[in-house]
Amino acid sequence: MRKINKEVIEALVKDRNVRQKVTQESFWLFFLVYFAHYIKYELAELHEEIIDIIQEEKNKLVCVTAFRGSGKSTIITTASTLWSILGVQQKKFVLIVCQTKAQAKMHMMSLRAELEENRLLKSDLGPFQEEIDQEWSASSIIFSNTKARVTIASLEQSIRGIRHRQTRPDLIILDDIEDSQSVKTLDSRDKTFNWFTSEIIPLGDLDTRIIIVGNIIHEDSLVVRLKNKIQKEEISGVYREYPLINDQGVCLWPGKFPTEESLKEFEKTIISPISWQREYLLKVVPDEYQIIHRDIIQYYDELPSNKGSYSFIVMGVDPAVSEKDKADFSAIVSGLVVYDKNDEGILYILPNLVNDHLETPYLVECIKSVCKENRKIYYYVKIIVESNAFQETIIQYLHRDGYIECEGKKSTEDKRTRLSAVSYQIKVGSILFPRVGAEKLINQIVGFGAEKHDDLVDAFTLSAQKFTSIRHSFVGFV
């Protein structure tokens, strides 16, 4: 932890010229001098690291997730916004985006409070003035000495093409733009991700920095998607994660919680164990309705070269309930069963999933096409079609065209029961998923009950139940 001599701080407070120079150069000293009124406890290494990451201009994309009350928004959204304009970075247009107008208003109030009431800051780096009689006047601040601007917006507002004079935003900060509702379904998570890639990234220029501040509230949230892409080196960026207590059991803010007893006392004030896990330990806690958790899903990298003495491919087909209902999707999920009398067998889910709006003639052709593709992997293919109401006609068409290994299966159980019935096979690794290619299916399985669509789950359970029934028939076989 970086130590600052008290005498040095006192000298900075007394000498305006020295103070101006060193605080413009160093975000760390800027924070210590002008935001000392925020520091109630000795700062921790996490604060120093966040400040260093923010100060380094080459970090164009930064994601910081930290426990509630860690000071991340104070450091990044308030202090770094001001330093980026008043310090050596000399930013000209900072855009801060929050989820709601209420949050945007709160951050604007915090910035204005510093600019209006922080006497030392005003004296050293002012004057400042508010924008008047312009579209964004209620949520913008103009710095008359640098001609820079800060604008705070919410997700409800259109920010496409926003500029300050000739300048595009050169610093964009996203602060807590997701909550438990906005990440509940895949559609809403995709919407946020698409908004980020199509609305936020194009707002800037080559030198624009994007900093995201938040928490981990879902295993497929925007910050987690960016985390995965950064760690896989698919994109350039910096990701940092700061739980209150790390995996080694070490408290990351000992100045605030010096003893184990103080931590335990604080935990008691949170009341909800789920909130403690999510908000402070940054753990993704499954919702009560969740049948299958992501951490039990197991993967394969390559299909086995030796198919064994008893193998086949099973195709589960879930036709749309009604051709007239455009909300329904048809789904096909295939799996290679590798099974012999010396083991219990494994179902390898294949990555050639189908999930689309398909009227009956096109669905039949799609089934035949996927079947031909599967036969390149293994010649024997069993097709299982959910056969309720008009769906019987699909089986008739397939039989007519020579696909005799096609059978119908009427649903006698609800979807939740069917998925629960095969969950054990997933847990013990009897059902494996491809490393790449089944992400949509896995999202539907993990998010079953919350996701808008579950057609792939239906097709998957048809394949999995067929595999399971064959497995059971081999129990005790020698």
Image (cartoon, helix red, strand yellow):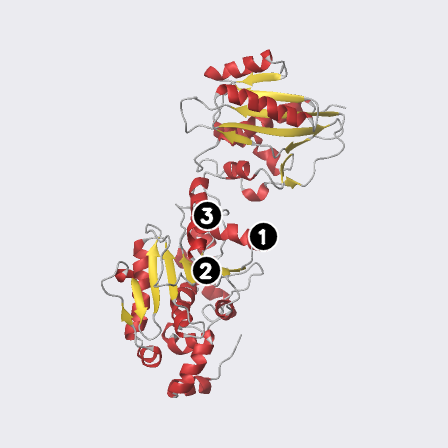
Q: Nearer the viewer, mark 3 or mark 2?
A: 2
- Check contact, mark 3 vs mark 2: CB within 8 A: no
Q: Residue 234 carries which label?
A: 1
Label 1 neighbour load within 10 Å: few <14, some 14-19, many 20+: few
Q: Distance between the residues labelled 3 and 1?
A: 16 Å
Q: Which of marks 1 and 2 is in front?
A: 2
Q: Distance between the residues labelled 1 and 2?
A: 20 Å
Comparing 315 with 180, the one in front is 315
How many marks do you count on the picture?
3
- Check contact, mark 3 vs mark 1: CB within 8 A: no
Name the residue tied to disc 2: 205
Name the amino acid, label 1: Glu
Name the amino acid, label 2: Asp
Tell me where residue 26 appears, x and y as whole percent. 47, 76
- Check contact, mark 1 vs mark 2: CB within 8 A: no
Q: In which quarter of the image is residue 79?
A: bottom left
Callout 3: SS: helix
Tell me where residue 270 appears, x and y as whole percent. 40, 56
Residue drawn at (55%, 27%), measured in percent from left and top? 332
Q: How far apart are marks 3 and 2 (CA)?
A: 20 Å
Name the amino acid, label 3: Phe
Residue drawn at (69%, 22%), measured in percent from left and top? 380
Q: In this view, does 162 lie to the left or right of 274?
A: left
Tell me where residue 398 appears, x and y as whole percent. 58, 15
